[in-house]
Amino acid sequence: MTLDLTIAPGSTIINKTGDWRTYIPKTDLDVCIGCSRCALVCPENCVKMKANAEGKNKPQTDYDFCKGCGLCAAECPVKCIKMEIEKK
Amino acid sequence: MSSPRRRESRVQVLNKFLDPCLRGDDTYSYMSKPQILEGSRAIALTIKNIRPAVISAYPITPQTHIVEDLARFKAEGIADYELLRAESEFAAASIVLGASASGVRTYTSTSSQGLLLMTEVIYNIAGMQLPIVITCANRAIGAPINIWNDQQDIMSVRDAGWLSFFAENHQEAVFQHLLAYKIAEKISVPAFVNVDGFVLTHSYEEVSIPEEKNIKKFLPDYKPKNGTYLDPANPRSLGTLVTPTHYQEMRLELNQKILDSKELIKSEWIKLQKIFNPQEKNISSYDNGLVEYYGPTKAKTVVISLGSVIGTIKETIDEENKKSGVFKNKTGVLKLRTFRPFPAEEILAVIKKTNAKKIIVLEKSISLGLGGILETEVKSALYGKTTAIINGVVVGLGGKDITKENLRKIIK
């Protein structure tokens, strides 16, 4: 078998880098004040602010691409994001 | 700026003084008439006729005359390649990498420290499996600084994943450039053609240059498959990150590709000889693209070596084999035309056929802290397969002359 040495554009969407993660951020949405700081600091741009049923903006983390760097947890003003060891 | 009309007339005037093969008036044969040419000139003319699209050039003794000539052909309007002057060898290698990745035929040449500066790019070219051909005019490496011939430079990149051809004389260098491009483009691996610095690059010898239209019969225009090269109309990336899952597979695949190229080199060498050297009727199995055995059918001693020193060895053993008394034991010489892929089976076949009792590995390179590089490789290739004694001799480092007298002593 000959391996293909070139690759079409868009490979970063196909290759899910979330499995590089050791710690997983868990957000307590009840404590969260919806300040969207976590979404701004995320280096992978995988935290998105979305309106919930009450119309309040709350963060949603895309675990397919979150590498578990912990920046969101460090920056959260109400400390509602906890980094937990991820059991795989 | 000169007008096109003036340039034309300048070329016409120059044509009167140019070599016959430059004028292109030999239309009756596959090769131009034999002529006395400098090695570098012969290589440059061959490259011009092979028609690469991009050439990068950075001067280093003793390869400078090759790219100087190529620049001259371009300036005179008799060649239409893009000639880029690089700011270093690293850039020169990167230029041909980029050009080749865009799907065109490329060429550059280098020597010694220049090759060392290219090293990182050399490995990348091999990993990206780009069919680039580089002429290495073999020269010693400093310190102490030395511009003369030995083969330590090429040995420093022997593991990079390139094919490596070694030429004995001008004509073989010319043929090996054709062969290198053919094999490289057919299986997508890069190739070095090694010519001994000064001994081949600066000496004058009789040589015939294949003509452009005849080269096309052996080496058609380079057309890589769609999706294997960089093209804005069909965007792809090359040389991207590869995780541990695939890296080893890719390295081993490249290794297998180079090992498998042996059969292709043999068959293409025969094709090449039939087209450009038809008077050579009998190509024996011991004179193929990988090795050439010269000497008596049964030999007590076989000398194994690379490059231009083969000529001196041939002459010495001819004289010695004729003498009676002085040399009771007949000697033969085995020339390795390729160093990568390493012709292990072919060496063994020759040793078995000649029934040699003693093997002398003569080389112009050394792995400091171990010894002869070729010696080590020959020993590993023959381990447990022959009872012959294998002796390695390191000679001619930094351009030290290898005389017939030296060779006589070594063979004894």
Image (cartoon, helix red, strand yellow):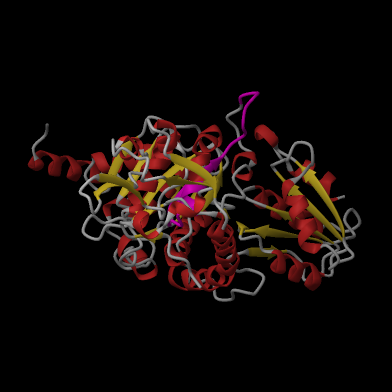
Confirm whether residue B170 shows in the render.
no
The furthest residue to the top: B144
Q: Residue at x 35, y 70 (%)?
A: B217
Task: Judge left or right: residue B107 versus residue B333.
Answer: left
Q: Residue at x 59, y 52 (%)?
A: B168
Q: Residue at x 60, y 65 (%)?
A: B259
Whether B276 is among the magenta residues is no
B337 vs A68, nearest the viewer: A68
Q: Quadrant of the N terminus of chain B?
A: top left
Confirm whether residue B14 shows in the render.
yes
Task: Judge left or right: residue B57 versus residue B117.
Answer: left
Q: Position of residue B121 (x, y in %)?
A: 47, 43
Q: Which residues are magenta?
A: B123-145
Q: Is residue B208 above or below residue B220?
A: above
Task: Judge left or right: residue B191 versus residue B317.
Answer: left
Q: Position of residue B372 (x, y in %)?
A: 76, 45
Task: Judge left or right: residue B286 versus residue B384.
Answer: left
Q: Is residue A4 above or below residue B285?
A: above
Q: How many marks?
A: 0
B226 vs B391, nearest the viewer: B226
Q: Position of residue B400 (x, y in %)?
A: 69, 33
* Residue A35: quadrant of the picture: top left
* Residue B325: quadrant of the picture: bottom right
Q: Residue at x 19, y 43 (%)?
A: B11
Q: Position of residue B284 (x, y in %)?
A: 63, 74
